[in-house]
Amino acid sequence: MSGFWESCLLSFEQDLPTQQFNTWIRPLQLEGEAQPESGLRLIAPNGFILKWVRDRYLARIEEYAEAFFGNPVNISLGLGEKKPVAAVTASSPAPQAPTAAPAQAPRPSAPPTPAPKAAASRNPSGNVYDKTRLKYDLTFDNLVVGKANDLARAAAQQVALNPGGAYNPLFIYGGAGLGKTHLIHAIGNYVASQNPDKVVRYVHAEDYYSDVVKAYQQKSFDTFKRYYRSLDVLLLDDVQFFNGKNRTQEEFFYAFNALIEAKKQIIITCDTYPKDVNGLDDRLVTRFDWGLTVQIEPPETEMRVAILKKKAEVEGLDLNDEVAFFIAKHLRSNVRELEGALKKVLAYSTFRGLDVTLELAKDALKDIIGSVRNVSIEGIQKTVADYYKIKVADLFSKKRTRAIARPRQVAMWLCKEVTQFSYPMIGDAFGGRDHTTVIHAVKTIEGLKAKDNELNHDLHVLVQVLKG
């Protein structure tokens, strides 16, 4: 059987670009010495490679097997430990960690794109700026989609298909742990795989700041500027960290202008709407509005369930719906919280040698779920109205007297403080008000609570009441 697999590897090595071959085919191993009549089994080192091979290469492997043995052969895939693989040929390159995984075409209706070619080294000198820093396993293919991120995902796909020509810049905002970073890595991976000659770079805002500091210390601003202006795609994560860093903002302002003028693509993420980022230069905010701004909201129940089942699948577990719905029902804020809960359940199952059941999940998460109380906007409105001795209907009204306006602002602030609802959702719940009204209310209360002892006391009491 080894003769077949060696032949198959050689065929793939000739047909595929080096990066694709080393990433997806070379890690596979033939299991045992099974006869072709009973089928052959290939072992993948992880679920991500297994799924990618099954979806894109399994049919071709079966064709190779039929040609080699003269009869159709059933090929199955499984997971297992990766063992050292002998070189296929003397000239075969050693396996490499992929710099960017080929990503699935964003839309099924999109025309097929050419197979990505291996990207050549762009700077043999190994310059510190010469790495994409992309996480190859964050792609459109494994992004769970729902109402919470559908618009952002669609915009990201259009940018990936047409970098520099669709929405530029693309500004994605939303709370922590909602998938902003996954989405921009997916863009970068797709562009890098389909356009290997393009220079793609992911950089966190704090790393950009560090680059500015180094350039200042080493008096190498020419190198710094030359590098960032040479990028075809810049993925800047968490731009809110530019708060108060004036020299960094100035350098980014010039880099931004240069890239946009050259029709190079910029994608930016932030934890809030661009105009609401504290300490951000107005001229940067204005430029962020040149393109498209989209929001990722906390995932709805169905999406949370899908995320849990997807994560469990990667771990090799078939998570039943009962357990998935239990976790999703009690943990609502973000994807990281869901992942943490799932990992705790899996660890609990492993340590105790028990199957993952609803009872086990309840026991494993009793500390987390016991401390979580789901608070609704309606509950906040009633609590605030009772506290300030006004009617709940007053919070929806157009009345602007201090006796009504201040409790309304407090209620809006509490909605942001103890729930994961977005500004637009909160505005809708207060008589259909615009999200900017909610933002103004939140900022007003934030500013007042530091100097108004009575208000600060009210807020403390209300938060304790709501959290129980």
Image (spheres, rainbow, N blue to C red):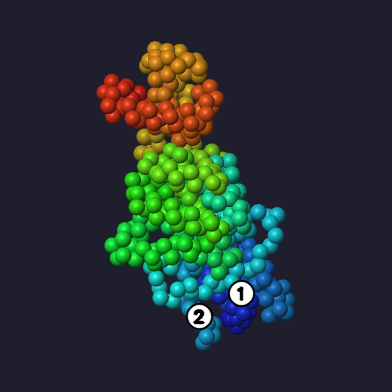
Q: Residue 60 appears at what percent x and percent y?
A: 67, 71
Label 2 to label 1: alpha-carbon separation: 13 Å
Visible in this render: residue 77?
A: no
Of the residues under marks 2 and 1, which one precedes in the sequence?
1
Q: Residue 96 appears at what percent x and percent y?
A: 47, 73
Residue 135 numbered tag: none
Furthest-bottom residue in this view:
90
The three-letter code of the residue at mark 2 reads: Pro
Q: Residue 132 appears at what percent x and percent y?
A: 46, 64
Residue placed under numbered mark 1 in the picture: 16
Specify few, some or many for label 1: CA neighbours under 10 Å numbering under 14, 14-19, or 20 or more.
Answer: some
Residue positioned 44% across, 76% down in the render: 124
In-front residue for pair 340/173: 173
The three-letter code of the residue at mark 1 reads: Leu
Q: Residue 449 appears at what percent x and percent y?
A: 31, 27
Secondary-structure class at tag 1 = loop
Q: What quarter of the picture does the N terminus occupy?
A: bottom right
- Which image quadrant for residue 16? bottom right
Furthest-right residue in this view:
71
Left or right: 305 in relation to 131 = right
Residue placed under numbered mark 2 in the picture: 93
Q: What quarter of the picture does the C terminus occupy?
A: top left
In-front residue for pair 288/72: 288
Residue positioned 72% across, 73% down in the render: 72
Secondary-structure class at tag 2 = loop
